[in-house]
Image (spheres, rainbow, N blue to C red):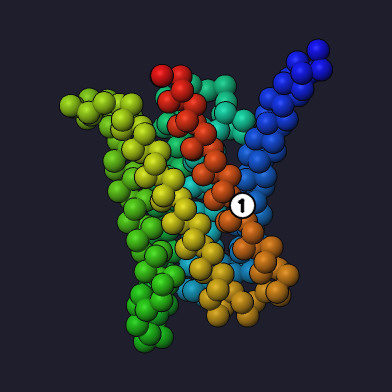
Amino acid sequence: MTQIKESEAEPRLFAFTRIASAVLTHFLGVVLTVFVAVLARPGTSWFSWHPFLMTLAFSLFMTQAILLFSPHGSPMRRFSHKVKGRVHWLLQCACILCAALGLAAILYNKHLQGKPHFTSWHGLLGLLTLGAVGVQAVAALPLAYHSLAKGWSLAKLKRYHAASGLVTYLLGSVSLLMGMNSVWFTASVSHAAWYLAAVCPVLCGLIIMNQVTSAYVARKRSVS
């Protein structure tokens, strides 16, 4: 009898932990975006648009796009998978647009100051991440329009999309983290605020990674 109670308590504990993790990811994504917006004050300079738009792209839009498929923290849990897929694609397009505008802002700012482009690892990784997000969005079209997936298994395409999407998200998280090591960010915040801000992309990355890998493992078990 005791063993049955313990086995029932374990799934409940796991379910509560996953719900709490999803809610925490929503919260951290919004908080980091608002924090950077207050810090950068977009519109005060060309540079101010760069950190704001990049954080909006990867901390908010991209995070929310993936959380749509969370079985424990999706705000669209009762909607069909097709509807979630369309909203996911729209959020990813918003992510690409914001990231492209953020890239344009920093390029123009450096042009005005006569500084060279892409001289740091942060800049190079950000460019790579933006390219990866663009390719990811285009490659996802056969999942929305099945007629484009001629000769391809949709199940395999979904697995490839999930795996490459996870890698892209982690690239975005690392890019945000590297941006926090910039001269502008470190000079604008205290040591305590820096660590609190840095925790956001790290925790979000770990939780999203657990969500994607858990969904893949569960699907594999159901098939076998």
Q: Secondary structure at mark 1?
A: helix
In the rendered structure, the answer to whether residue 146 lies left or right of residue 150 reads right
Q: Quadrant of residue 196?
A: bottom right
For mark 1, does the 10 Å Cα neighbourhood hold few (<14), some (14 to 19), or many (20 or more) residues? some
Q: In terms of depth relative to the viewer, which is nearer, 177 or 135?
A: 177
Q: How many marks?
A: 1
Q: Residue at coordinates 46% horizontally, 19% vertically from top-left?
A: 222
Q: Residue at coordinates 56% horizontally, 69% vertically from top-left?
A: 180
Q: Where's the C terminus, which quadrant? A: top left
In the depicted structure, whether residue 109 falls above or below residue 101: below
In the depicted structure, whether residue 221 falls above or below residue 165: above
Q: Residue at coordinates 40% horizontally, 38% vertically from top-left?
A: 162
Q: x%, y% of residue 212?
A: 49, 38
Task: Indicate the amino acid at tag 1.
Answer: Leu
Residue at the left extreme, as displayed: 151
Q: x%, y% of residue 82?
A: 42, 24
In the depicted structure, whether residue 84 falls above or below residue 26: above
Q: Is residue 151 visible to us here?
A: yes
Return the residue at label 1: 203
In the rendered structure, the answer to whether residue 27 lies left or right of residue 171 reads right
Q: Quadrant of residue 116?
A: bottom left
Residue at the right extreme, as displayed: 2
Q: Is residue 68 visible to us here?
A: no
Q: x%, y% of residue 102?
A: 44, 64
In the rendered structure, the answer to whether residue 115 lies left or right of residue 49 reads left
Q: x%, y% of residue 165?
A: 40, 44
Q: Where's the N terminus, which quadrant? A: top right
Q: In terms of depth relative to the viewer, which is nearer, 47 or 186?
A: 186
Residue at the top extreme, as displayed: 1
In the depicted structure, whether residue 224 falls above or below residue 125: above
In the rendered structure, the answer to whether residue 156 lies left or right of residue 224 reads left
